[in-house]
Amino acid sequence: MLLARSRSLFFMAFIAGALALAASLYLEYAAGLEPCSLCIVQRFFLIVFTAICLMAVVHGPKRSGCYVYWLLSVLSCLGGMVTAWRHVLRQSAPPEQWSTCSPSLEYMLGNMSWLCALKKTFQGAADCADVSWTLFDMSIPEWSLLFFAGMLILGIFQLLNFLRSTYGMAAR
């Protein structure tokens, strides 16, 4: 029962991730919003999360495999959540704290070490602080933070269920 429920939850998480990814692509290509480097990093974690959920649905793993998939999804959600949280903080900072310009993510990855590029990305630039679109008075990074937090809670809940069922069976 636990495995069947887990597979359906992975399917629902995959659908949620695919819809969020479709929304981000719509905002970029149809609405004409240019993503900043923090948006691109968030999209990377969203793609990783969605791919993990799809692999779990297709694979249909046993108990230990489900545990690994939930753990991987929690890690990808943590990465996305930290990135979105930094982006929200960047948007709420006063304008005098913004960097004037920063090279693009592609340039940084091509010409710097990945650690240096990641550091520069998290420092952000003025384009990361712009709020160019809102829905219900929440910006894109705030929606992203809400999505990743929800999926993180789901993953942690499932991991705790697996641990409880594993130790509950071993104690009997």
Image (cartoon, helix red, strand yellow):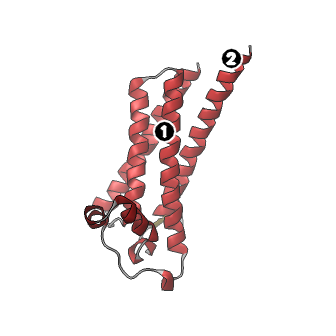
What residue type is disc 2 on?
Answer: Met
Q: Image quarter for residue 2?
A: top right
Asked if residue 145 shows in the view, the reply is yes
Q: Could you tell me residue 135's position as x and y percent? A: 49, 63
Q: Image quarter for residue 165?
A: top right
What residue type is disc 1 on?
Answer: Leu
Q: Quadrant of the N terminus?
A: top right
Q: Secondary structure at mark 1?
A: helix
Residue in the picture at 46% in, 22% down: 61
- Given contact means CB atoms under 8 Å apart, are the residues at marks 2 and 1 in contact? no
- Going from N to C along the chain, the mark reached first, 2 or 1, is 1
Q: Could you tell me residue 122's position as x and y percent? A: 45, 66
Kindly report the distance in space between the C-alpha atoms of the residues bearing marks 2 and 1: 24 Å
Asked if residue 131 shows in the view, the reply is no
Q: Secondary structure at mark 2?
A: helix
Q: In the rendered view, does 21 fall on the left or right side of 107?
A: right
In the picture of the structure, the residue carrying the numbered disc 2 is 169
Residue extending farthest right: 172
| 140 versus 103 height, above or below | above
Q: In the rendered view, does 29 fall on the left or right side of 145?
A: left
Q: Quadrant of the C terminus?
A: top right
| 86 versus 2 height, above or below | below
Dot 1 surroundings within 10 Å: few (below 14), some, or many (20 or more)?
A: some
In the picture of the structure, the residue carrying the numbered disc 1 is 72
Query: Is residue 135 or residue 86 the one in the foreground?
Result: 86
Q: Could you tell me residue 74's position as x and y percent? A: 53, 42
Q: In the rendered view, does 161 fall on the left or right side of 103?
A: right
